[in-house]
Structures are given as C-alpha cells and as structure tokens.
Image (cartoon, helix red, strand yellow):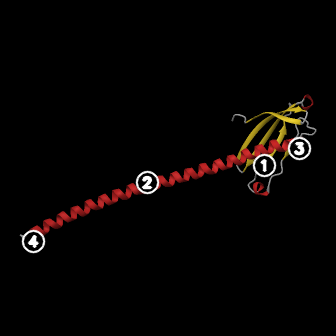
Amino acid sequence: MTARSFDRSSHIDSRRGGFVLLIALAMFSVVSVAILALGLSMSADARRTFDRARRSQLDQLLLAGTDDARQHLSSPHAGDTWNTQLPHSLSEQAATLQSTIDPASDPGAGQLLLHIQARIENRSAEQIVRLAKNANGWGIVEARIPSE
C-alpha cells in the first residue's frame, strides 16, 4: 500500500508541477507583451519629440527669414531671391532659408508678398508674409502658413 500511495503522490506532484509551469509561462507571456508595448510607446514618444523639435527649428527659421528680410528690402524688386546665412550647426544639418519677393508684387505701390522657405534635412516649411511700406520702412501686415 505504501508503494501505491507513493505513486499517487508523485502523479499529483507532476500535475502540480505542470500547472505551475503553465502559470509561469502565462505570466512570462504577459510580462513580455507589457515590455514590448512599453518599448513601442517609448519609441513613438521619442519619434514625436524629435519631430516637434525639428518643427520648432523650422518655425524659428521662418521667423529669422522674416527678420532678415528687412535688411534686403531697402530697394526691393519683384522676383528678388536671396538665401539667408545660417549658423554652422544648422548648415551641418543641410538647413537652408530662402526668401523670394512674389513676382506679382509691386513694391512701388507700397505692398509686396514675401515667400520664405525653410528646409532642414528632409523637412521643410513655408510662410507667406504680406508687407506694406510705412514711414519706418516695410511693416508686416500679415503672415500665414499656406495650406498643404
């Protein structure tokens, strides 16, 4: 009888061991999925942060282009185009800032449209600034981002 009860007890232990192994594997699967989801979330956050930083740099370039335009508007002509000199750190990122006076503008009439294009690596942004001649030179009347 002892041998028989021993067999039964080892059979019960092996079933418990299988159940414990199954629970351990299920918990490992849940933890693995949670770690994967956390990694994907962190990756998406990093990408979003990088995109926002790049967009902020483009916005700053557009502001710099608007400010730089005042130096070039002493005697403006329709169709004039110029590139703004950028710091070395931006030039290393293939950044450019180009401003163009709209060919349809008539600076002699005291109004002009200025197209400013900023580019950093593979991203770009554009802004259109409407200026009017006043006693102090050219003043900004309107600035807008064209719809894409």
What amino acid type should be assigned to the residue bearing mark 2? Ala
Tell which circle, 1 or 3, labels the residue nearer the N-terminal end. 3
* Mark earlier in primary sequence (1, 4): 4
Q: CA distance from mark 4 to mark 3?
A: 102 Å
Earlier-in-chain disc, 1 versus 2:
2
Question: Which residue occupies 78% across, 49% down?
Answer: 96
Q: Label 4: which residue? A: 3
Tell me what residue is drawn at x 47 percent, y 52 percent.
37
- Please give the residue where the numbered disc 3 appears in the rendered image: 71
Q: Amino acid at mark 3?
A: Gln
Question: Which residue is the extreme one toward the top?
Answer: 109
Which image quadrant is residue 67 in? top right
Q: Number of labelled discs? A: 4
Q: Is residue 84 above or below residue 132?
A: below
The residue singled out by tag 2 in the image is 34
State how far apart marks 1 and 2 are (Cα).
Answer: 43 Å
Q: Earlier in the sequence, mark 3 or mark 2?
A: 2
Residue furthest toward the front?
135
Q: Under tag 2, what secondary structure?
A: helix
The kind of secondary structure element at disc 4 is helix
Q: Residue 96, which numbered label?
A: 1
Alpha carbon separation for disc pair 1 and 4:
87 Å
Crowd rating for badge 1 (residues with CA inside 10 Å; few <14, some 14–19, many 20+): some
- Identify the image quadrant of residue 79: top right
Find the distance from the CA under tag 1 to the CA under tag 3: 18 Å
Question: Pointers 1 and 4 in contact (CB under 8 A)?
Answer: no
